[in-house]
Each structure stands twice: as structure tokens, then as C-alpha cells.
Amino acid sequence: DGGITQSPKYLFRKEGQNVTLSCEQNLNHDAMYWYRQDPGQGLRLIYYSQIVNDFQKGDIAEGYSVSREKKESFPLTVTSAQKNPTAFYLCASSKSFSGDNSPLHFGNGTRLTVT
Amino acid sequence: AQSVSQHNHHVILSEAASLELGCNYSYGGTVNLFWYVQYPGQHLQLLLKYFSGDPLVKGIKGFEAEFIKSKFSFNLRKPSVQWSDTAEYFCAVNALFLNKFYFGSGTKLNVKP
């Protein structure tokens, strides 16, 4: 079955360390997204990518970085510059970024705890 | 700034009660509208979507939603809830001109058996 795989499910890091969250999809989707979910705040967009080798900042990109070297993969790095990194991170994809009314498909998420 | 508002943060119902969850958005252009559901321990799943046509859309598991353009609303309804509907529900708007998905803050539904 096609889907989005996020790993690991739980991640613990010390303050000051960078950490990379993995996101892989086998849906052949062009567009991929990273959201952060905090209690009572819904989902906020960190970065998105419309196509390979291209990505754009979302609403809360500060302290994060991404790459999109392959269509299937969109890893997110949480850097030490992110002031409040402890959160639940969701990766999503859609068939295309515009024009065809594509819904988002989500992975199971990674819960990051930084102490 | 564009926004999606879900006014009910936590709803508690008994089984067989009717459900209506409110969703309002602020974007004035063409939009696609979605409701997603997150069951405990599971990933976000698409419940239903509205793109165009009949403003009353039906989704999975007996859910439906009505798009009222004049009120910028897309409320979710179910005539009779079940214990298995216990989950968190998110309204989402894809503002087509901006090509961005905006999510509401979510509503936690707790259905008592």
C-alpha cells in the first residue's frame, strides 16, 4: 500500500543539538509538506516543496531546514536555533501543489522532545 | 492574515447524540475545504472534502458537511455519533490563490458509551 513513512516515532535530543526527521512517500506525489502540531494550535506549516530540488518557507520556518533531493524524500532538520522545538511533527504530501484539488495525505508523525 | 476558526475546542457527547462542529474561515477567494480526523494513536485521515458543486458533501462513516459561502462556514455534522467517533477533528482550507492549506486548531470529540 502506498503511504507516507515518518521515522522515528519518538525522538529525544539534548538542547543545542540539530536533529533530522525523516519523511518518505511512495505515492508518487510531487508536493510535500512539513507541519508542526501543538496542543490548541492546530497544524502550522514549516516548509513545503512543490517539486524536486525546490522548497519554500511556510509560516514558521525559523530554526528549521529541509532538502528535496529526491521526489520520495523530504527530511526536516530541527536546528539549535529553533527556540521551542519540542512538538509533534507531521509530514504530508499531495499529488500536485496546485490546480487539481489534491487533498493532503499525512504520515504518522514524529514526536520530538528536546531537554 | 488568513485563518480558520474552530470554536469548539472540546465536545463531549453521549452515543446517539447529534454532532455539529463549527468551522469558519477568513479567506475571500476560491477555496477548497476539508475535514480531517485523527483517531487516538493514528495519523490524520481525510473525512470529506468540498471542491465545487453541491454544497452539502458526504464523507466516510456517516459524516457530512455543508459549505455556506455567505457565512464562510463549513460545519461538520453527524446525526448520531458512536463511541468510535472519539477523535480530534480538524477543518482545513486550501486557499487556491495562495496555494496553501490552513488548518483550524482542532476539536476534540469525546463520545461516552
Image (cartoon, coloured by chain):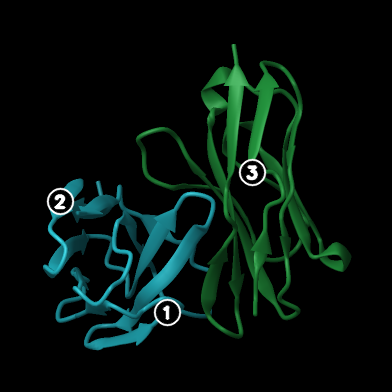
Percent from the top left, x then y, of residue A96?
41, 75
Mark 3 element type: loop
**On the image, numbered disc 2 is attached to which residue?**
A12
**Against B67, is A67 above or below?**
below
Q: Earlier in the sequence, mark 2 or mark 1?
A: 2
- Badge 2 crowding class, 10 Å Cα cut-off, few under 14, some 14 to 19, many 20 or more, is few
**On the image, numbered disc 1 is attached to which residue?**
A58
- For chain A, give the colour: cyan
Left or right placement of residue A78 versus residue A31 in this view? left
> Which quadrant would the C terminus of chain B be assigned to in this image?
top right
- Asked whether residue A2 appears in the rendered view, the answer is no
**On the image, numbered disc 3 is attached to which residue?**
B9
- For chain B, give the colour: green
Left or right placement of residue A83 versus residue A10 in this view? right
Q: Chain of mark 1?
A: A
Left or right placement of residue A63 versus residue A41 in this view? left
Are the residues flagged by discs 1 and 3 from a single subunit? no
Residue type for callout 2: Phe
The CA distance from mark 2 to mark 1 is 24 Å
Q: Residue at x 49, y 80 (%)?
A: A98
Percent from the top left, x then y, of residue A66?
23, 78
**Against A69, is B86 above or below?**
above
Residue type for callout 1: Gly
In terms of image quadrants, where is residue B73? bottom right
Residue type for callout 3: His
Percent from the top left, x then y, of residue B46?
50, 49
Percent from the top left, x then y, of residue B51?
65, 65
Quick one: which residue is furthest to the right in this view? B70
- Badge 1 crowding class, 10 Å Cα cut-off, few under 14, some 14 to 19, many 20 or more, is some
Left or right placement of residue B31 versus residue A37 in this view? right
Q: Chain of mark 2?
A: A
The CA distance from mark 2 to mark 3 is 29 Å
